[in-house]
Image (spheres, helix red, strand yellow):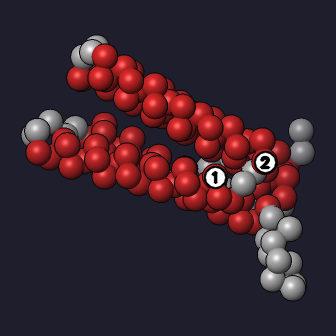
Amino acid sequence: MSQEQTKISLFSKIESQSGASALIKESSIWIAMVVVISQILGIFAYGISLENIIALIVDVVFYAVIIFSMIKWQSKIAALLLLLLILYSGYSTISIGITEKSLSGFQLILSAFSVWVCVRALEATLKLKPKSVDGIGT
């Protein structure tokens, strides 16, 4: 195993295109795990009803499509959409937690971690496919 392969993580510097590609895949897997954890916690917190199940399915489909497009095409747009979706999700989690007086430290940590991972994924997509000299992206 080369030194480059061992250094790739969410907290390491992106030094090559293969490192950026690996970071995109790793961050996509982390976001998928966070989505699964948050959906399971949502089922326990809000119970099982038709409305909650439909909302869960819609959330999972949105995340799955965006994560798939990030892994498959390493898209900048998908990374930006994922970041916006995670920011909105974190905002709604925090605002609902504050209004219901049920905000936990775990929810804050999960939201902050999700935002960090999405920012790293966006950074990796930008470094993977930088703009060329003539201004047209590759």
In the figure, 5 relative to 79: above or below?
A: above
Q: Regarding mark 1 in the picture, which secondary structure is present there?
A: helix
Return the residue nearer the eye: 103 or 15: 103
Tell me if residue 93 can be seen: yes
Residue 72: x and y in percent read 78, 41
Q: How many marks?
A: 2
Q: Which residue is mark 1?
A: 78
Image side of residue 52 versus residue 21, left or right = left
Which numbered disc, 2 or 1, marks the residue that appears first in the sequence?
Answer: 2
Residue at figure coordinates x 61%, y 43% from the top left: 66
State the residue at coordinates (87%, 85%): 134
Q: Where 74 sits versus 62, above or below?
A: below
Image location (x, y in percent) of residue 32:
56, 33
What percent of the width, then of the height, locates residue 73?
A: 78, 48
Residue type, mark 1 in image: Ala
Contact check, label 2 and label 1, Cβ < 8 Å: yes
Residue picked out by circle 2: 73
The C terminus, quarter of image: bottom right
